Image (cartoon, helix red, strand yellow):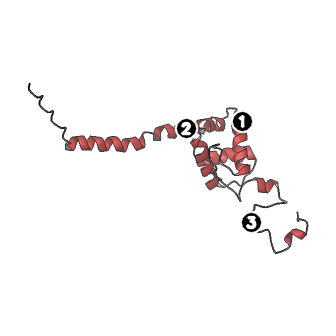
Amino acid sequence: MSRPSPTPSPRLTRRAMLTAGTALALTAVIQWPAQATTGMDADAFLALSKELTGKADLDGDIAAKMLKAFETIGKTDEIAALANGQAKPDLGNDIVAAWYSGFSPDPDSSEVVAYNDALMWQAMPYTKPMGQCGGETGYWAEPPVG
């Protein structure tokens, strides 16, 4: 009985290495067109949020964090559609709720996107965020001004 001759092991050529490197680099860019076609960026999300909440003084950095949180749960296309005039009342309510609570809209996340800047503190002027100083010692003995 004769033994089968061993198959030669593949050699890594310069061409194979360049092809593999190019393919690896392209995998990072492949997702870019899908995100770019949505037309939703932080500025557009901020404008939509201002319209939905009726607040003109929303923070752009917080808007970027919130948009990222909505991207995590796959809502970017729906937000872009809402910004383009399609009726999506549940999504609009979710965006407003995120601004008021400061929590990420991702139900699997415990991330707080904004705490001191959450709109609930403006809606409840009689209180303040926990851990934030309200004034001099004994300030709570007098009723709030305003």
Residue farthest toward the front in the current orientation of the protein:
1
The one nearer the camera, 50 or 100, is 100
Using the rendered image of the protein, determine whether residue 51 is visible from the camera's viewpoint.
no
Picture quarter containing residue 135?
bottom right
Q: Is residue 90 above or below residue 98?
A: above
Residue 128 at x, y percent in the picture: 79, 61
Helix, strand, or loop for circle 2?
Answer: loop
Q: Residue at x 72, y 45 (%)?
A: 96
Instruction: Categorize mark 2 by other alpha carbons within 10 Å: few (<14), some (14-19), many (20+).
Output: some
Q: Is residue 146 above or below residue 101?
A: below
Looking at numbered disc 2 in the image, what kind of residue is underneath it?
Answer: Thr
Of the numbered discs 1 and 3, the one sitting upstream in the chain is 1
Q: Evaluate if marks 2 and 1 touch, with contact meaning CB atoms under 8 Å apart.
A: no
Instruction: Categorize mark 1 by other alpha carbons within 10 Å: few (<14), some (14-19), many (20+).
Output: few
Residue farthest toward the left in the current orientation of the protein:
2
| Quadrant holding the N terminus | top left
The one nearer the camera, 110 or 139, is 110
The one nearer the camera, 26 or 1, is 1
Residue 132, label in figure: 3
Q: Which residue is mark 1?
A: 90
Q: Is residue 139 above or below residue 100?
A: below
> Which circle, 2 or 3, is nearer the viewer?
3
Picture quarter containing residue 75?
top right
Residue 112, label in figure: none
Cα distance, mark 2 to mark 3? 39 Å
Residue 38, label in figure: 2
Residue 77 at x, y percent in the picture: 58, 36
Instruction: Categorize mark 3 by other alpha carbons within 10 Å: few (<14), some (14-19), many (20+).
Output: few
Q: Residue at x 19, y 42 (%)?
A: 13
